[in-house]
Each structure stands twice: as C-alpha cells, then as structure tokens.
Image (cartoon, rainbow, N blue to C red):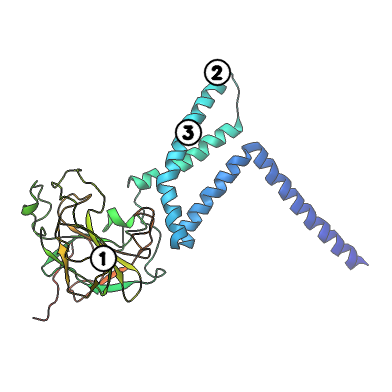
Amino acid sequence: MVMSLNLVNGIVDKDFDIGRNEFIFKKLLRKYGYTNGVLIGLILLLWISAFFIGDIFGVYSWTILKLILPVVGAIGLMINFVMLIILIVKKQRSVKLFMNIVINIIFIFPILMTMNIILCAYPNTIERTQPSITVGWPLTEETVVGWGGNHVKDNLPHAVWASERWAYDLVMEPYNINSDSNEDYGIWNKEINAPVSGIVVAVSNDEADITPGTEDFTSIEGNYVYIKIKETGTYLLLNHLKKDSVTVEVGDTVEPGDVIGRVGNSGSSSEPHLHIHHQRQDPTKVIHPVLAEGLPLFFEDIDGDSMPKKDAIIKPQTDE
C-alpha cells in the first residue's frame, strides 16, 4: 500500500513539474511575444542546420544567415527604433519591444561574417564531406596558388561560402603587379587542360575580358567550362576563361590533358587567373551559384601538397 501511494505521488509530482514547466514556458512567450519565440527557434534551426546537418540544408541555411537575415534584421531594427521613440515620447515601456530589438540585432550579426570582419569558413569538414576527388593539374607550367586550401586564412574569398569551400585561384609570375594590361600577367592566355574524365555540361565563350582592377564584368563567372565528372557524377567548374578561347562544346567527352580553353580575365576578376572548384549540384540547375555544396578537391602529380594552400608554388610533374 505504501509503495502504491509513493508511486502515485511520484506520478503526480512528475505531472505537476511538467505542468509547471509548460506554465512557465507559456508565461515567457506571453511576456516576450510568441513571434519572438518563433524567430529564436528559426535562428537556432539555421545555425544547427549549417553546423551539424550540412548537405543542401546547410548550404541554404548558411546563405540565409549571411545574406537574408541581416537585411530582415536591419529593416526590423529601424521599425522598432521608431516604435521605441514613440513609446519614449508617451513615457511607456515594453518588454516585447526590447526583445524585438535584441532579436533584430542577432539577425544582423552575421553581416560581420559576410563582410569578413569575423572570419568564419563554411562549417564543413573534409572528413565528413563526400565524395572528394583527386584530379590532374590544369596547367603545364609553374603555377602559384593565389587562394586555396582548407583554412580561411589561406582561402578567404572561397572558404567562407558553401559552394566554393575548397576552391582555388591560380596565377603565374608575374602577378599582383597592378598593371591595367592583361598581357602583362604571366598566366594570361595559358592553355587549360581538362583535369579529369567527364562530359562537358556547360560552356561560355563570348564574354569580354575586363581590364585588371576594374568592375566592368557582365557575370560573376565570366567564360567557363563545366564538366560532369565520370567517376563521381559531381561537377568540376573552371571560370574566368579568355573570350573565344574555349575549344569544347556541351556534350563533348574530355579526358585528362585535353585542351579546353585558355586563361583569361572575364567575369568578376581582379586580374587574369584560373578559378577551379568541385561541387555536388549541377551548375546549370542551381538557382544561384552560391546555392551549391562545395566538395573537397585534391590534385595528383604535383610536387606539393595534394590540397595546396595560398602562395604554394606548384610544378606539375610530366613524363618527360
């Protein structure tokens, strides 16, 4: 009998605790606003998705955090400041309004990452990201890695975005010389070899090369060749090619070493260079270039690390 009473009391106490917690939760929501509760849940969901779930869910979450939430937060902050001024004039206070302002500031916070004031790579790791691919070096002469590698300090323009997490910008001596003539740069007009076996899924060949240091580009990618990799079914993207230099067409099969074009300075480019990266999604079908999942990209037959970092000098190994 005593054991039965203790069991009943335990159940009652447990139910009482659950009821009390629900009451406290509802009380907090009423005090700070149900909408604010939903917004806090959304923020947590986005961060959890980006850091722990990954895949395309992480990609979209990261993009929303860096590009959309700051805009929404800025608009909301302006509206709430106007409301705050009205309350001050009326000599009134509002806990919900204060909470609104705090949440809007949290929304705006990721702009510090977008502006690279806080350096944070897209939170994906080589270990958990598959498939990776090892390909041939796309150039035949000594090359300098302008940006590349796994860490944000070595790959700042790329690693902070999901699609270009392990992208590379390649240059040759002389580079970074502040000349306004493309011909003065070492990599200008160098032949680009297909690094991998696959099928060409997209090309662009008619965008003009821009003057170094200007922003007169038409598209971000400029001229390009995109290859669906035979081994993995993923995609290799090569951007900023020279106008009228692309030698392949959509549907062509390429093998390592096939010439596919020449290095130019088309698109969003500070100087002649070759951009190359590996991603999961078909680049012809993504809504925007940043909304793709970048995948690890390694190189074979070079005398340096298979994932070379910024400032690495690469000498391709040949059979000669």
- Residue 311 picture quarter: bottom left
Q: Give the residue at mark 2.
A: 89
Name the residue beneath numbered marker 1: 250
For badge 1, the amino acid type reads Val
Instruction: Identify the mark at residue 24; answer none if there is no mark.
Output: none
Q: Kindly report which numbered mark, 1 or 3, lies closer to the viewer in this rendering.
A: 1
Point 30% across, 56% down: residue:
158
Q: Which residue is at a point 23% across and 67% down the rendered structure image?
A: 308
Image quadrant in which the C terminus is located: bottom left
Q: Position of residue 180 (x, y in %)?
A: 9, 46
**Disc 3 to disc 2, C-alpha distance:** 18 Å
Taking the image as shown, residue 10 lies to the left or right of residue 126, namely: right
The residue beneath circle 3 is 77
Q: Is residue 19 above or below residue 225?
A: above
Task: State left or right for residue 47 relative to residue 136.
Answer: right
C-alpha span from label 2 to label 1: 66 Å
Residue 78 against residue 163 in the figure, above or below: above
Q: Residues within 10 Å of mark 1 (few under 14, many from 20)?
A: some
Mark-to-mark CA distance, 1 and 3: 48 Å
Is disc 2 placed on a helix, strand or loop? helix
Query: Looking at the picture, which amino acid does disc 3 mark?
Result: Leu
N-terminal of the two: label 3 or label 2?
3
In the depicted structure, whether residue 114 falls above or below residue 263: above
Task: Say which of 151 and 50 sits in front.
Answer: 50
Query: Mark 2 or mark 1: which comes first in sequence?
Result: 2
